[in-house]
Image (spheres, rainbow, N blue to C red):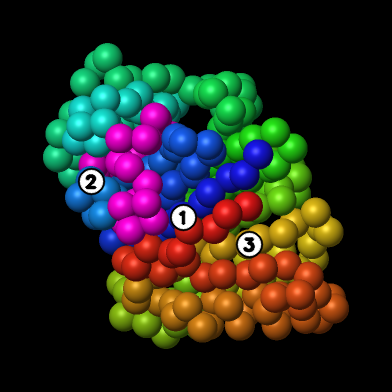
Amino acid sequence: MEIRFMSIGSGSCGNCYYLGVGDYGILIDAGIPSKTIRNALKKEGIAFESICAVFVTHDHADHIKSLGVISAKANIPVYATREVHKGITQNYCTTKLIEPMYVRYVEKEETVTFRDFSITPFEVPHDGSDNVGYFIEVGEKRFCIATDLGEITETVASYVEKANYLVIESNYEEQMLAMGRYPEFLKVRVSGPRGHLSNQVTARYLAANFNEHLKNIWLCHLSEENNHPELAYKAVAMEMGRYGIIPGKDVELTVLKRTTPSRLFVL
Ligand SMILES: [Zn+2]
Ligand SMILES: [Zn+2]
């Protein structure tokens, strides 16, 4: 069974990822306007109405802003942990609350079967009310998304290492953050164990733990202030090169743009 993947937005301006199977699909996070999502899908010939559910990683504004609007417009359920749902209702950035009829709860490490998708949320260390990554199986294909996390914990690694297709955060270039204009408290937050992954940490992890069953890596959630797509790509490609792994040959490596949708990947 083919999986179709597209990043519609990735980074602090708003996150939204599409995963499609057959004639329907799901979204992971909805931190960008529903109109942007609709238009991006339409360009690939996908109807907004074919979205059947949204799964939420955590309750930061860049991941949740449009949930209420989208769930009402597309008439779809929103899956998140109890704490994340609670956080969403208290977040001032939420433009419209999610109607109770669309609220669905997930538990970490408990697989939800949603039509062809088997979806397992797992704990990631970050400073939202609660924070998860998703491990998603469709038939034999294993897709994993780990965004907004300060560290690659053992739990995170146990899911990441099983993936054929991996979306992983590469938020900031360490030197840019250190030398940049962020106030000290923000530098500490971003680089802390409940903040974000740097290019360097992601690169070292990916290179040292490379698996031959890993086919695609997408670097996500790049900082506007403290990163450049070329730097993120270079950091990962160089570190992999040390282990004899060549992006483009041994694995596909793509940097996801912050505000421009990616192409539709058919996996
Ligand atoms: Zn975020
Ligand atoms: Zn976050």
Q: Amino acid at mark 1?
A: Met
Three-letter residue code for mark 3:
Ile
Q: Is residue 32 visible in this depiction of the protein?
A: no
The residue that disc 1 covers is 6
Residue drawn at x 81%, y 57% is: 211
Name the residue tied to disc 2: 34
Judging by the rendered image, the residue that carries numbered circle 3 is: 217
Indicate whether residue 142 is drawn in magenta: no
Which residue is at a point 63% across and 62% down the rendered structure image? 217
Q: Magenta region: which residues?
A: 40-67
**Disc 2 versus disc 3: distance between alpha carbons?**
26 Å
Q: Is residue 239 above or below residue 83?
A: below
At horizontal 15% and vertical 34% (from top left) the residue drawn is 96
In this rendering, position of residue 171 left or right of residue 160: left
Real-space Cα separation, disc 3 to disc 1, in angstroms = 13 Å
Q: Earlier in the sequence, mark 2 or mark 3?
A: 2
Check whether the beta carbons of the residues at disc 2 and disc 1 lie within 8 A of each other.
Answer: no
Along the polypeptide, which appears first: circle 3 or circle 1?
Answer: 1
Among the 4 quarters of the image, the one containing residue 139: top right
Upstream in the sequence, badge 2 or badge 1? Answer: 1
Q: Are marks 2 and 3 in contact (CB under 8 Å)?
A: no
